[in-house]
Amino acid sequence: MPEQRPTLRQWIGLTVTGLVLIGMLILPGYQSPYDLLTYTRFLVLALMAQGWNLIGGFTGYAAFGNVGFFGVGAYTTGLLMLSKWHVPFFPALFSGAVLAGLIAVLIGLPVLRLKGHYFAIATLGVAEAFRQIADTWDSVTQGSTGIDLPVRTDGEFFYYSALAFVVLGILVTIALKRSKIGYAWVAIRGDQEAAKMLGINTTAMKVLAFAFSAVFAAIAGGLTAYQNIHVTPGDFFQLEYTLQMIIATIIGGTGTILGPVLGAGVYQLLSTYVWTRFLELHPTVLGFIIIVFIIFLPRGLMPVLTGSIDVLRGRRRFRWQALLANVRAHRVT
Amino acid sequence: MNPVEFGQIAVNAVLLSGILALVALGFSLVWGIMNIVNLSHGAFVVLGAYLTFYLHELVGLDPFITIPIGMVVLFLVGFVVQRVLINQVIRAPLLATFLLTFGLEILIVNLVNYFFKADLRSVTTRYTGAGLSLGPLRIPYIRLAALFISFALVAVTAVFLRATRPGRAIRATGMDIDAARLTGVKVAQIYALTFAIGTSLAGAAGSLLSMIVPFDPNLGGTYTQRAFVICVLGGLGDVGNVILGAILYAFVDVFVGARLPEMSQAFTFGVLVLLLILRPQGIAGKKFYA
Amino acid sequence: MRLVSRLASLLVLGLGSAPILSLPAIADDTIVFGAAISITGKTAKEGEYTRDGYQFAIDTINQMGGIKVGNKSYKAALKYYDDESKSERTAQLFEKLVNADKVNFLLGPYASAPTATAAPIAEKYRIPMVEANGSAESIFNKGYRYSFMVLSPAKLYLQGVLDLVKSLDPAAKTVAILGENEPFSKEVAQGAAEHAKEIGFDVVYHELYPSNTQDVSSLLTNVKAKSPHILLGAGHLQDSLLVVKQSKDLGVSPRAMGFSVGPSSPEFRANLKSDGDYIFGATQWTSALRYVGDDPWKTPQAYAQAFKAKYPAYSVIPYQVAESSAAVIVYQRALANAGTLDPSKVRDAIAALDITTFYGRIKFDKRNVNIYKPMAAEQLQPDGNKYTVFPIEVAEKKALYPMPPWGQRANR
């Protein structure tokens, strides 16, 4: 369908996004440094989720090892900054992103031939292997002792950098979605054999998605490394980061543009709230939340939000049964 | 490596393979029949371990006697979990059940942590550490018993799957769910039964482990991982494949552990990834239970 | 119904993030010490010891009139969070303590890895952190000026056991070392290996195993083949337990077995029962030592008595408790010397300290590490108790040596 004048829905979407963006820009003036840290974490998570969304959401290949690229980005950034050339932050960060992308291509070529569970497990294994390599390659990574990046105290720097990357990520996602690449991804997710028959080079497209996700993760890794200062294999290759980015994307809505960002926000909000109130049971509550979302809202919140615009306009009725629709569709009796 | 070292390492590997087979069997059954990769499998292992520990400490039961008790309890727990929770999303895309079981794992482990604390526990009896000495080789009694019990349970499960009505119904559902339904199989019940068998076996493994290693609520994670690898190594075809996979895995793990302990996990995962790329159906198996 | 629908969706759309309210302001005459400690998770027990050590010292100081700074007396208070034994949480919590809770000074977490994550944060905000439970020297090789290590560094941990065995049995020659692959344990293992060679031992085996390992039988099989006289383990409580259990399983019977962490905790004995007999443990401090210090308790014995009175659940006092209290004492003295609450002046005052306490001598070298206090060693003995056996001058009982082989012991 040809793109004509933006619809009301698109105007609303644009306005809301614009307002949020303005809010985010003036935020630091009104928040304590600790709260700013929380917002920065949200943005970094959004970045990782955006990347994951490309391979897991659009292309339908649920990668379970993207923290591997996160760690690669962290260590590359850190090691370059600490090297004798004292590479400044942004060049080091971009080098990390490029390296992660290349590694993703190398690994993606064989691994993307697998499907479903096997692909997930293979990527999980790759991330684990990276962790072990970082842990034992003492001469380069200092092994389990870790490395310490130069100390930088201004939280605003990290906040604005992360915000800039997230916005960039949104634009990149829009561009990709509308391009042939985006259509190819969705085609692969729908029916890979048919896509092949239509002449789409599925291997190249899949590898591209994977590489993009790696780049996003690596940038997130480099930012986190610089902000946290201390980088160890145990912290920077942990499964929890992969799970956070997947859950954030699911909460927000896979295969959508703003989904990952929304999901990251909701996740961070929930996590912070739960952490302050239910510290000891915090993982339990998170686990429970994951279960609830999977059962009742597997397509995430974006469809709910876009749907609610219709409801507000009186065009559609909101039914609680809609939440059970997923269960009705997927249960076994 | 001298022959004595080699011999002892081989013995260690054989002993290890028993428990691994037990853990992997439950996991593989659930995966093969229901196409669910149950990330919470390890949590049920932990539950079994704690059950044995408390029955031993509070009631004074010998840990081996607690095994059947644990199995029954975990069977019921697993049945309920599947019937009430997992059955709701079972036909959703793979990611859904993956994440659901992951959420379940976090929930269970954290609840165990909350109620029982993270202190290390061991089940120590008069016969802990005693062993058979075959010349220079040592075979600890408890590990030997664990090996026999594991294989006994595996054998019983295999017979159950082949020779009983429910067992055949399970296999039929795994092969062709619609055909099974047409012959009157209640799929929801069968799924619950399958999952319950899985958790019950996991619980038994946990009970055995409680006697062998000091454990805390985080015990389960590595066993879920190993169950993955074993299923990929052996394939999902049938019980024999699981045993094969477990033995192979145990040998690789123990021998690599002896020579390159730091790299043992990276090595294992490297092998796994290679195997997935070159032969995803595993060394011997097919992709579903038949 | 439609109104409800519309309201419901407005609610959904209106999901914004609310800033998290921070806690009420701290009273003016209180000095707050902040820490992230592992109250749950893998090192939960040791985290509890740390917290109790901090709290006990603070309570005692308050009872005696508080901390004197200049001519004002301040109440001391502890604000802590649980980092669940996860070092990335530690960093986040320290940020919270500094930024949101605005604590005055920092106390360290439990274990080296979390301390390594916290030290850069103390440096970032230029607030002193006195840590009492992270002994990896690698933390202090980065030139951080605001963190201070009260306890003896990792490489000294197992030296006492080696020295003791050498004095009891000059013929003992071979040593096998197993270590957990993480910063602290690596240093312990390395320090043990170097010291062993220095005093004339042969290190016949030196391997690291992954953290959270469930099985060291392969390594122990190798060790058994070499029949070492001494087996040393550098890990944490869980691995130490594993090594002992699997040594018994496999019949690995050296003349002496020693661990850097484990034997001094009650859990060690509780899990192993009589299998723990004859095992040596490195310890930073025991109540049998004979220091006389200038602090609220003065001697180790008095400290132990006072602590037990307040915390009767403890049958023995783990060294983590004592060293945590020592950290608070460091602040008490430094604040008195500095005469101000200004963080950088307090930092300088800490760096200049040279005091003897119930915990031993506390003085910091150029890297802010306390290398001036020696390590001690304990042994679990068949009567069910644990005794200080090294340094020999202050030993409570003679060490029992050698360890009877596993097969020849009567199980209790």
Image (tube, grey):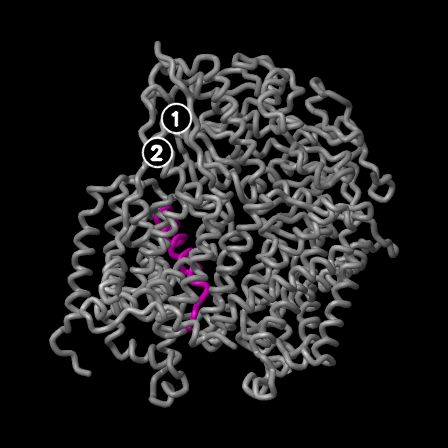
Q: Give the SS element for disc 2.
A: loop
Decide which of B220, A179 is in the foreground and name it: B220
> Among all residues in the image, which is located at the extreme front?
C1
- x and y percent of residue C70 in the render? 35, 11
Please give left or right for residue A105 compared with residue B278 in the image. left
Is residue C68 visible in this depiction of the protein? yes
Q: Which mark is residue C261?
A: none
Is residue A210 visible in this depiction of the protein? no
Residue under pointer 2 = C101
- x and y percent of residue C24 in the render? 32, 31
- How many residues crowd around disc 2 within 10 Å: few (fewer than 14), some, or many (20 or more)? some
- How many residues crowd around disc 1 within 10 Å: few (fewer than 14), some, or many (20 or more)? many
Name the residue at 47% across, 21% down. Answer: C330
Residue under pointer 1 = C32
Question: How many labels, in total?
Answer: 2
Please give left or right for residue B268 compared with residue C127 in the image. right
Range of residues picked out in magenta? A61-82
Name the residue at 79% across, 48% down. Answer: B129
Q: Give the SS element for disc 1.
A: strand
> Among all residues in the image, which is located at the extreme left?
A5
What is the three-letter code of the residue carrying label 2?
Asp
